[in-house]
């Protein structure tokens, strides 16, 4: 049923799945026998063995010329068939679009009876990964050559199969395990929005700008204490490499996984990205002449913090997750008229002109340009010990920092680039300042215009509706 902007379109709420010990404080939990759950881990190599256009930089238009680092999809499956497992998949790509995520969700629903709210796909937002149909469709300011498009479509089909395969493999791998988590800190992310006179002035290094340096970590061990998997999250673009790099690579997130797995043979490391849409790694390309060296340094910083946390006291998780998913409508600002599109189609900036030509072609086909963006918000709450928030798109840091004021930051884990990457998700502040994250990037995502300022409250209110009682700031376990 059609609703007004911001109203919920779909609400999927799964029942509470509480097993084992009842949750207690971190100190008291360590005195109890740790809860045991079926947990499966898997990984699948998703590296294409053929040249393919890489996405993330519009000026890089030749197909890839080699492999610097292999790419992976990895999965965690938590819970039994009786209680209903939850499956999290991380994918090394700039952005897995909704058309891929929803197709895999449909397959898992049929083959493994996984409810949609119990499945999430998290992209690492690398800028050295293959193009996918449905993500950044107008990135390059010109049509793909037919042979490039053929390989992009081929890889999109393959990645869909890979994500299904790794999810099913994790489900098949389930065996008794313990879950625990901790929160660390890594500091190579820096705000990239150069501001002058309270207005956006372009990309740069803004040490005074907001950033989230938290690094939450989930640990999976078997019943003998052997490490099986690590999931970490950090709010920073994977843009250590610039457009001059045309080889496949996982950037800092890929090296972080590589180093953690090197330090802990037999374990699988998964990396998701937080609200890092306005944060870049520092240093990076353009600042350091050797981005490969720097990508490895950033990866090592993550791995070192993982190793530090593993040596300390982690908080056991004694409940399986309550999972919720809602789709809301985010309203776009005023859509340009056809006459305005026709003027933009003659703009000397080829990317602006190409985007306008795309909109005119839609109108010529009798299509209506969207006035709203369908947007998924998802949460997994492990008792009252940990709440994970998953938001689609390139989410700016204001959302994470605001959520950590509304809810207990010591029990909160916030992920962006989840389930879909339809565009940047700016805050009210950034929309007021303008610039790339507010509006400039919309031409590469083939969106008709910028979002309205009220989207921030719509998203935050949706998270609030999903969050269980007891997570509000100032409330204790």
Image (cartoon, grey):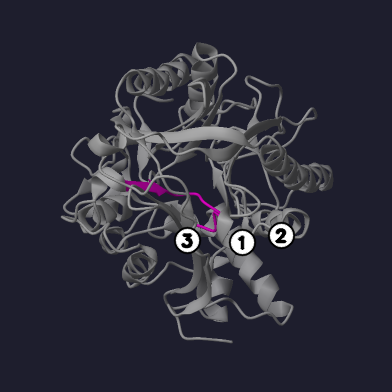
Q: Nearer the viewer, residue 50 or 435?
A: 50
Badge 1, how many Cα within 10 Å: few under 14, some, many 20+? Answer: many
The spot of residue 123 in percent (x, y) is: 55, 43
Is 474 situated above or below 4? above
- Labels 1 and 2 touching (C-beta < 8 A): yes
Badge 2, how many Cα within 10 Å: few under 14, some, many 20+? Answer: some
The stretch drawn in magenta includes residue 307: no
Residue 60 visible in the shown view: no
On the image, numbered disc 1 is attached to which residue? Answer: 116
**Image quadrant occupied by the N terminus:** bottom right
Is 99 situated above or below 374? above
Taken as a whole, is the magenta stretch helix, strand or loop?
loop
* Residue 357, image quadrant: bottom right
Please report the bounds of the magenta region as a residue range.
412-423
Identify the residue at horizontal 69%, vertical 71% (top origin). 361
On the image, numbered disc 2 is attached to which residue? Answer: 109
Identify the residue at horizontal 81%, vertical 44% (top origin). 154
Q: Earlier in the sequence, mark 1 or mark 2?
A: 2
Is 307 situated above or below 232? above
Measured in 3D between alpha carbons, the distance from the residue under mark 1 to the one under mark 2, in whole angstroms, is: 7 Å
Q: Earlier in the sequence, mark 1 or mark 3?
A: 3
The stretch drawn in magenta includes residue 422: yes
Residue 426 visible in the shown view: yes
On the image, numbered disc 3 is attached to which residue? Answer: 16
SS of the residue at dot 2? Answer: helix
The spot of residue 282 in percent (x, y) is: 34, 27
């Amino acid at each position: 049923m059609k609703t007004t902007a911001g109203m919920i379109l779909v609400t999927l709420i799964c029942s509470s799945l509480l097993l084992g010990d009842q949750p207690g404080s971190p100190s008291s939990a360590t005195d109890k026998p740790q809860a045991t759950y079926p947990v499966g881990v898997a990984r699948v190599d998703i590296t294409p063995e053929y040249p393919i256009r890489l996405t993330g930089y519009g000026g890089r238009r030749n197909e890839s010329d080699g492999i610097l680092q292999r790419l992976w999809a990895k999965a965690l499956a938590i819970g039994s068939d009786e209680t209903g497992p939850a499956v999290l998949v991380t994918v090394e790509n700039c952005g897995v679009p909704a058309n891929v995520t929803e197709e895999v969700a449909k397959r898992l629903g049929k083959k493994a009876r996984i409810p949609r709210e119990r499945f999430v796909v998290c992209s690492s937002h690398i800028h050295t990964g293959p193009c996918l149909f449905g993500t950044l469709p107008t990135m390059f300011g010109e049509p793909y050559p037919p042979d490039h498009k053929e390989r992009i479509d081929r890889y999109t089909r393959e990645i869909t199969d890979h994500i299904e395969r790794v999810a099913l493999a994790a489900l098949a791998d389930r065996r008794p395990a313990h879950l625990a988590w901790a929160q660390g800190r890594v500091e190579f992310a820096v705000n990239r929005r150069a501001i002058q006179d309270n207005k956006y002035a372009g990309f740069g290094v803004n040490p005074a700008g907001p950033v989230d340096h938290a690094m939450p970590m989930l640990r999976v061990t078997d019943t003998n204490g052997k490490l099986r998997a690590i999931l970490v999250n950090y709010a920073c673009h994977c843009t250590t490499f610039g457009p001059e790099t045309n080889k496949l690579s996982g950037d800092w997130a890929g090296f972080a996984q590589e180093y953690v797995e090197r330090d802990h043979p037999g374990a699988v490391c998964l990396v998701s990205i937080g609200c890092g849409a306005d944060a870049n790694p520092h240093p990076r390309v353009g600042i350091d002449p050797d981005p490969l060296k720097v990508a490895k340094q950033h990866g090592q910083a993550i791995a070192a913090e993982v190793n530090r946390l593993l040596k300390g006291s982690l908080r056991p998780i004694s409940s399986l997750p309550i999972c919720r998913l809602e789709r809301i409508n985010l309203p776009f600002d005023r859509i340009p008229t056809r006459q305005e599109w026709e003027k933009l189609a003659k703009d000397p900036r080829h990317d602006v002109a190409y985007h306008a030509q795309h909109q005119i072609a839609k109108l010529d086909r009798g299509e209506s340009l969207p006035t709203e963006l369908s947007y998924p918000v998802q949460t997994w709450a492990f008792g009252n010990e940990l709440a994970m928030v998953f938001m689609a798109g390139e989410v700016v840091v204001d959302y994470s920092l605001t959520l950590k004021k509304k809810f207990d930051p010591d029990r909160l884990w916030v992920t962006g680039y989840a389930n879909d990457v339809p565009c940047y998700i700016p805050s009210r502040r950034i929309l007021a300042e303008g610039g790339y994250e507010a509006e400039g990037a919309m031409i590469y995502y083939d969106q008709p215009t910028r979002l309205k300022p009220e989207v921030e409250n719509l998203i935050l209110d949706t998270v609030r509706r999903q969050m269980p009682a007891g997570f509000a700031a100032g409330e204790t376990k």
